[in-house]
Image: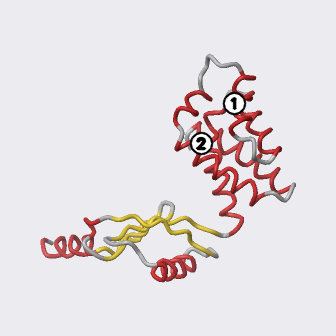
Amino acid sequence: MSKDLEVASRYATAVFKVAEEKNLVDEFSDQLSSIRVALSENEPFVKLLENPTLTTEQKKELAGAVFQGINETLRDFIFLLIDRGREDYLSVIAEVYQERVNELRGIAEADVYSVIPLSEDEKSALSQVFSKKLNKSKLHIHNHIDKSLLGGVKVVIGTRIYDDSLKTKLKDMERQIRA
């Protein structure tokens, strides 16, 4: 585990424990998800927040103004990150926090690659099959279009890859013929 991920993981675990104690796991999840989206879509704000010429108080004022609608405990957590010079970890912390929530709920994240967009029924069927294989209650599917697959699907869940694409089947056949 990289040092950055290790640090972010410790903070995410701490804020997750606070959320559990205060019965705010879902609220924090929604708000951290919104913060993560806001940070990814607003690079000038991120650069300003990480600007070393701004004082801690200026950064807190800025963050307080932008994130004024969030839970007070979560806002205080963001201020703590700023106090410790860790504001650049906020996106990763939000990501790791969501992983903790998914673990709690028995949910796995899956990237599914297909030639054409999957219908909701196809996503649901894939979710049922793979959630059983992984002992999870649900699978969140993120569908990606990859025309190079020629047909079929490739499913990536964590470090596991299930490749049932026509491209891979053809490559396997080619290897068998050459052998």
**Crowdedness of circle 1 by 10 Å Cα count: few (<14), some, many (20+)?**
some
Seen in the image, is 88 located left or right of residue 152?
right
Which residue is most to the left? 178
Look at the picture and state if 42 lies above or below 60. below
**Crowdedness of circle 2 by 10 Å Cα count: few (<14), some, many (20+)?**
some
Quarter location, residue 171: bottom left
Colour scheme in use: secondary structure
Quarter location, residue 27: bottom right
> Distance of mark 1 from mark 2, alpha carbons?
25 Å
Q: Could you tell me how many numbered marks the image carries?
A: 2
Which residue is most to the right? 22
Which residue is most to the top? 53
Residue ID at (70%, 34%): 63
Seen in the image, is 16 located left or right of residue 148?
right
- Report the residue marked by disc 1: 62
Kindly state the secondary structure of the residue where label 2 is placed: helix
Residue ID at (73%, 49%): 13
Kindly state the secondary structure of the residue where label 1 is placed: helix
Residue 60 at what x, y percent from top left? 73, 29
Residue 12 at what x, y percent from top left? 70, 47
- Report the residue marked by disc 2: 5
Badge nearest the viewer, 1 or 2: 1
| Front-most of residues 161 and 79 | 79
Question: The C terminus is located in which quarter?
Answer: bottom left
Residue type, label 2: Leu
Seen in the image, is 125 located left or right of residue 68?
left
Between disc 1 and disc 2, whose residue precedes?
2
